[in-house]
Image: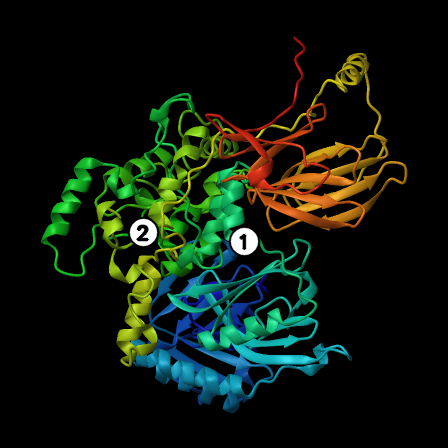
Amino acid sequence: MEKGRFSLLVLEPGEIYFEDFSACLIPSDTTTSNYELKKQQGRLRMCSKSLVFEPHDLNKPLIKIPLKECTILEQFKGKAKFLNKSKNVLSVSTKLYIEMFEGNIIEPYKFCGFSRFLFLLNYANIMDCLPRITQLQRASTLPAGEQADMIATIVHSRQARVRFDPLWLDLYEKVVMETQADKVTPLVLNPGRILLSSARLFFQPYNNIETYPVLKINLSSIRQIIKRRFLLRHIGLEIYSSENNTIPYIYFAFRSPADRDKLYDNLLQQSDLKLSKIEQDVMTLQWQNGYVSNYDYLLYINSLADRTINDLTQYPVFPWVVADYKSKTLDLNNPETYRDLSKPIGALNADRLQKLMERFEEMSFPKFIYGSHYSTPAFVLFYLVRFYPHYVLCLQNGRFDHPDRMFNSCEDVYRNCLTNMSDFKELIPEFYDVEQGGEFLVNSMGINLGVRFDGSKVGDVQLPPWANSPKHFIRALRDALESDYVSERLHLWIDLIFGFKQRGDEAEEAKNLFYYLCYEGSVDLDSIGDLNKRRALEVQIMEFGQIPKQLFKVPHPQRKVKGPMLRVPSVDKESEKVNEDSTSVWKSVTSLNLESTFNTHKDSVSALLITDDNNQIMSVGYDGKFKVFSISQKRQIRSANIGNMPLSSIIQLPNTNVVVIGSFDNNIVLYDLDFGKVIQTVMAHEDSVTCLAWGNELKLLASGSSDCTVKIWRSFANSDVIKPMQCLESQLDHNSQLTCLCFRITVC
């Protein structure tokens, strides 16, 4: 959160806010008689490219004065009775100034012509402030690259004099390291100093724009630390904390990869740090087997590919899934409802693609098919203009887009993405986020976004006929995303965006080529000595869009549509009557009373087992844990970490204290309850073990798997050791993955 109406978003993207002064604005038409009426108390904020005056009166507009437009910046030398001979006055004459948020209303900025302003500094000394302001004004007259370099020098000089305040540290807290970095939020960089201690991570901004003078994150609350690219340079670091933390996430950009890596390495060495990490192959396997939704998996691989909501140049990208925005009802069982996920959005229209390919063939190297990207800051904010109008005004120099080019209708936008020669944008996560419920589709702030050609005001987004509300619209899109049709084909779209069809010959064959600056490794910004050329390339990279980091070099596995069912108890001849008796008891049940509750696994519980004495419950879960609970004591009495992969099933061998556990890593695991350890791990299948069953009469173990097989293992010959070659009795093949097993004895 930021203080008052002033925020870094009223500045140019990348502009730096240094400091502010208590001041009184005196407009040029002020006289002795109207002084009390005209003067405005507020704060004058000194920034790298502008001066911004924020009046205390919310009805008065913020006034932004670009330094490059100033003709006079000096100490006021005139005479005015209402100033009482004060010399502590800054005189500014400018060819252009900008008024913002008059009446505290979000609307396009007003660009005004020549004017003169006097700022009476209430406490600061004009002779201390003026040299700093004029130095920045000189920098503003330089070409873009040289201007950025001079401002960087000024910033470095000012920041080198700032030290971290040790009073923020506790008595026994030890300093590990200190460095500089920018805090990254959409369109905004805020420089500051990072200090890592033995217990906490601190960020001390060089200005007072943040809610707190120092941001503090306990190392014990950090759950993820992710290295990121920022403007195609490996200098980003994003840190996620527990959900109840006051700072759930923070994103930093460092001066160099070495600075970033040094903090990362030092963080990992701290004993208080307890990261929760899911390996990529584990997450993919969970998604493949239906334990992770398509939505969550796409969020996960976006994060792996350096896409984050904190960086509009690398915002998470989601696919258009539904292709029908005209029907009165949406039939999710009809294949015609869906977009072809095997093709990039630009290749869905054959006629348009032919024209693009004709241009491609005539093009000189480096060639590209699409002159526009599927995800850029402008495209993200095109969708989110009603939700984040300040970001749009920042990105578009104080203006909204033309009313007829805005996000007015879902049908119009999709049609444009299929037909326009320069529109190939995909979607963003908000289109599938049922918790947010489509808030970005509603003009709830009542923003004046203009009037369209037909005379209608731009208001809420027009939904397709099959949606009766934004919530219903998002729910339907989410249902489509999670449908069997999409689940069977989503891997094809992943290949295009994150996988082996992202670049090279495979990308060209798939008609999936973009401008060369979109790709990581296409240009080394650090090696470019010409400051103006480097700055121009940075702007191009930021505005044009960036291809995600390539995650997969081979085709992505397909999702198995038929997900696993709940495991049912195995039945054999000896226990058959007991089960029948139990069933008859349950048939007469009319109500249930809660006996006890156990706080179990961190992820889904996949299988339960009640011991023969009815005193213990055993469970396994997707967190890789095996747990035992005492019913009589009403508490957990054992917890064992079996591995990093999800566990699917559990049975207990009769007359022993050995349990058999099925795992997603294709293994059968034998765990000895007496000794509290794994006594054997057997590679039993070519894919996840999904279910187990014990045939007590025959002393046979059956295991089912996602590899579409059931394997029967014979008696262990008085040994609790499975020897795959000797013990495998037979293999039964299925046409799909196994979900449950049971033995049943048939008496002839």
- Residue carrying label 1: 279
For label 2, the crowd category at 10 Å Cα-Cα, with few meaning under 14, some 14 to 19 and many 20 or more, is many
- Image quadrant where one finds the N terminus: bottom right
Q: Residue at x 45, y 31 (%)?
A: 480
The amino acid type of the residue labelled 1 equals Glu
**Is disc 2 in contact with disc 1, using a CB cutoff of under 8 Å?**
no
The colour scheme used here is rainbow
Q: Quadrant of residue 416?
A: top left
As displayed, is residue 110 above or below residue 624? Answer: below
How far across and how far down the image is residue 676, in percent?
77, 50
Viewer-side label of 2, 1 = 1
Q: Residue at x 51, y 73 (%)?
A: 261
The extreme top residue here reads 748
Mark 2 secondary-structure assignment = loop
Mark 1 secondary-structure assignment = loop
For label 1, the crowd category at 10 Å Cα-Cα, with few meaning under 14, some 14 to 19 and many 20 or more, is few
How far across and how far down the image is residue 168, in percent?
70, 77
The amino acid type of the residue labelled 2 equals Gln
Visible residue check, residue 45? no
Pick the residue in front: 271 or 590: 271
Pick the residue in front: 364 or 562: 562
How far across and how far down the image is residue 276, in percent?
62, 56
Visible residue check, residue 98? yes
- Residue carrying label 2: 502
Could you tell me how far apart the alpha carbons at marks 2 and 1 are, in whole angstroms? 22 Å
Q: Residue at x 75, y 44 (%)?
A: 627
How far across and how far down the image is residue 653, in percent?
74, 34
- Image quadrant where one finds the C terminus: top right
Residue 34's disc number: none
